[in-house]
Amino acid sequence: MDRQTSDPFQRLVTALKRLPGVGEKNAIRLAHHLMKEPPGTARELADAIVCLTELSRPCSLCFAPSLSEKCRLCSDPRRDAATVCVVENVPDILAIERSGNYQGLYHVLGGVLSPLDGIGPEKLRIAELRDRVERGGISEVILAVNPSTEGETTNAYISDLLRDLDAKITRIALGIPVGGELEYSDKMTVAHAMSGRRKIS
């Protein structure tokens, strides 16, 4: 496409619509917002995208995007390397990090098991997780895979795969979110909340 003759606004809208969850209206809104920003903002955004897609590579340990062999978290000596939290994708790491309550490392699977979609164990980083735990030095593996049907299948598969190793296998607690109302919660959420109850006195 000729950048000089094409409509730059429409070109940006078309590009933004390729992003998941961004429809025509949201793409137009975002393009309009960017058009009003200083040129430096657009350059910073473009540079961040290029850096992520062209310069980054999977971390050799956790498989999150990194500019070096190991990502920022895996390279941090202050993190607890004996604890590994297993997540589906990178956004899950960001969500856990925002909580400020976890100081261990991560392992990014790259999705969940879904036979109907042709996603078996060989298409995820499950074998790499097994190898990582086998090498030793890991005392706990925390399963933080989303509690969908596929996620529960993935949790069960990983639990069975690691059962013969020394690491303790745990999973994050599930239940009613803070500020949520019991009557509006779905039955799976309530079931997990009830089964995950703990003693308080």
Image (tube, rainbow, N blue to C red):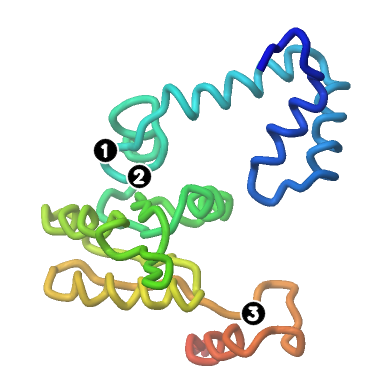
Counting residues from the N terminus, which is met first, the one under dot 2 or under dot 3?
2
Mark 2–mark 3 CB contact (< 8 Å): no
As shown in the figure, which amino acid type bears the numbered disc 1? Ser
Q: Tell me the CA gap for discs 1 and 3.
A: 36 Å
The amino acid at mark 2 is Arg
Q: Residue at x 20, y 58 (%)?
A: 127
Mark 1 vs mark 2, CA separation in Å = 16 Å
Answer left or right for 125 relative to 39.
left
Q: Residue at x 39, y 25 (%)?
A: 67
Could you tell me residue 4's position as x and y percent? 75, 8
Numbered badge on residue 135: none
* Disc 1 to disc 2: CB gap under 8 Å: no
Q: What residue sits right under mark 2 in the picture?
A: 79
Q: Which residue is mark 3?
A: 176
Quadrant hosting residue 116: bottom left
Q: Earlier in the sequence, mark 1 or mark 2?
A: 1
Which numbered tag is attached to residue 60? 1
Near-viewer residue (172 or 27) = 27
Mark 1, other Cα within 10 Å: few <14 / some 14–19 / many ≥20: some
The front one of 141 and 92 is 92
Q: Dot 3: few (<14), some (14–19), or many (≥20) neighbours within 10 Å?
A: some
Quarter of the image holding residue 32? top right
| The N terminus sits in image quarter | top right
Residue sitting at 31 percent across and 65 percent down? 120
Observer-side mark, 1 or 3, equals 1
Q: CA distance from mark 2 to mark 3?
A: 29 Å
